Structure formats: structure tokens, C-alpha cells
Amino acid sequence: MLRVGIAGLHRGSGFLGLFKAREDAHVAAVCDRDADLLKHFRVSLDVPGYADLDELCQADVDAVVIATPPPVHAEHALKALAAGKHVLCEVPAVYTLEEAEQVVKAVKASGLKFMFAENMCYFSFVQTMHQLVKDGRLGELMYGEGEYIHDLRGLVNTPDGLGGGVDGKPSWRAVLPPIHYCTHDLGPILMMMEDRVVTASGFHTGTRIAPELGSIDMEAGLFKTAKGNVVKILCGFTVERPGFHYLSLYGTRGSMETDRYNPSGNLKAYFRDIHGLTGLADLPVSLSDPHAPAHATAGGHGTSEYYMVDDFVRSVLEDTRPRFDVYDGMDYTLPGICAHLSAENGGQAMQVPDPRAW
């Protein structure tokens, strides 16, 4: 039985139902700086509750889910690893290049499991796209595009547990460079390409929509991969448009893209091996796996996190490589950090470190 501690109960509360439904894992402790939130879950779950992550790391748990704000993901992962706990870490994995090297070295030295919680890779429509790629329908992939647009201005003044969002101090959402949060689209693309980014260039639009927040409105990254592929990612979180994800892939034998207004609507595709096809074919896809058990939607993102949690628990109990390990986590995170550094330096291309070399 895997005993799990949840750190960060705003985002982390979505994992509670997924662990509760399992017979091989359960939530044994919770942690949050919000006293009211902590008391609610401590009482409702009848488990110990801690206001400090150091205390959670000393508790009787085998693994810690890091669902705290992104600026402290690395700090909290390092503490959990140092205490001998396996880690399931929310996105992005780290905030700086220096933190990335520290986390990779800590995972290697500890021998513990570190899994990157990139839930987009588990969405049913992404899995359908991945299967089409593995079946060779697109041939050799060469170009990918992703967009994550989500107006989050309503959350900027919400207390973030780090002292922001109150008394006029901006929360982490207000100061996070948008391209730092590229993993939701870059991750699935690199997963399907079986590739990693080696060079990153970035550009942003500055602060125009909400200057009182100081937030960068939109930021784009242009990436070159180890296989010579090109990927473009756009992120924006103070944007005058309803939120959406968009993915597009081009290969030597075909192309496909999600519906820009509804990613779980029909997939638009063109395959050379379909004779007589003169336009894009509609392939039905879904957000959730229709074959998943009824409780699989407890995470709140379709069935994606049911499969994500399953992979993490199995990797620990069966002592196997996590589906998205620390190297994948850095491969999906570091390009965004480098793209922002590039944007701050006039778009000058930057080399993206290979975490396997640390």
C-alpha cells in the first residue's frame, strides 16, 4: 500500500478522489499554508495535516504529490527527495535552469521515483493522435505547433500561499512568464516526436491588456529539436479570448490538428494513404477515455489524471521507470525557460541543456 502525502490543496484536492478509489494507495497526510483549507481536508479525510512541507516530509508517507505553486516546485521536490519520498510533481517542473540541475542530481543520487505530472499527455484525444503517429499514418514527423490560451486574470488577486494575491502584492500567476507554462502543449508534441529541444528562441508582446498586473500578455517559443524538427508554442494568460488548447502535427505522409475551438471535438487529418481524399477528414476523438472506469473523472481533467496517477503508483510499487521521468520533465520544461530568457534578450537563440548530461 503506497502512502501518499498531498502538498498544496487547491490544485492537489483533485487527486484525492483518484487515490481514494485505489486499493493499492491512499492519502495518508495533507499539507497547505491555508489554515481553513487544511482543516477542512484534515477533518474530512481523517488524516494528519501540516502547514509546513518540512513536517509533511517527516510524516509517515512514501510519496509526495507536489501541487504547490510553480515557483516552489523545485524547492519542495528537493525537500521530499532529501526525506526519502518519491515525487509526483506538477507542471512546470522547475522555475530556473539552476533548479533543474539540482533536481536532476537529487533524483539520480536518491534512486527515488520522480514523475512529471503532465496530464495533457494522457488526454484521450492526445492518446489518439499518438497512436496515429505510432501507426505511421503521418510518416516521419517534422513540425509541431501548440497553443495554450487561458484568461486567468480572475485568479491573479487570489491568495497564492506564497504571500501574493493579497495587500496589492501580485500572485505568482501575474509574474509567471507565459512560455514557462508551455509544457501542456510542448509535452505531447515531444512525446509524439520522441524528441527533445536543443535550441530555443522566444518573443513576447509585453504588457498591454492589463498593465496594472504587470503580466506579459502573450509569449511564443520557436524550438529546434535534436532530430531537426521545428516546434512553435504560443501561451497567453491575460488574453481577450476564451481558453483553449490547440495541437498540430505535420509529417512526411500526412498532417493532423485539433479543433481550435474544441480540442476534444473532431480531429482534422489528412493522410496520403487515403485515396481520393481531397480535404481534411474528420476523426472523432474525446476528452475522456470512454473505456475508463466511472471514477476515473475524479481528478477534474477528464480521465487524464486517472491514468497519470496509475502510472505513478505502479512505477513506485513495481519499481519501474515512471512514464514521464525527471528527464522528460526537464525536456518539457527547460525550453520554456530558455525561450523566455531569449525573449528578454531580443530573441537571441539559446542552447537548451540536456538534463542527461548533469
Image (spheres, rainbow, N blue to C red):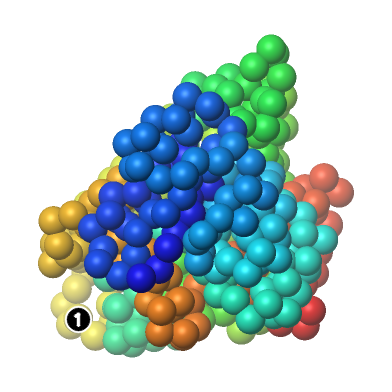
Measured as percent of width and height from the top left, residue 355 is found at 72, 76
Tell me if mark 1 has few (under 14), some (14-19) or many (20+) residues whose alpha carbon lies within 10 angstroms of its own. Answer: few
Closest to the observer, 208 or 181: 181
**Considering the numbered disc 1 on the image, is that residue within a helix, a strand or a loop?**
loop
Residue shown at 70% from the left, 61% from the top: 78
Whether residue 187 is visible: no
- Residue 193 located left or right of residue 125: right
Residue shown at 55% from the left, 22% from the top: 158
Residue tagged 1: 274
Measured as percent of width and height from the top left, residue 280 is found at 25, 64
Measured as percent of width and height from the top left, residue 113 is found at 55, 74
Measured as percent of width and height from the top left, residue 252 is found at 43, 83
Q: Quadrant of residue 83?
A: bottom right
Question: Which image quadrant: the C terminus?
Answer: bottom right
Say if 153 sits above or below 19 in the image.
Answer: above
Closest to the observer, 41 or 304: 41
Q: Quadrant of residue 156?
A: top right
Say if 46 sits above or below 124 in the image.
Answer: above
Say if 150 sits above or below 189 in the image.
Answer: above
Residue shown at 45% from the left, 66% from the top: 188
Give, as a three-letter code, the residue at label 1.
Ile
Residue shown at 40% from the left, 45% from the top: 47
Q: Quadrant of residue 315?
A: bottom left
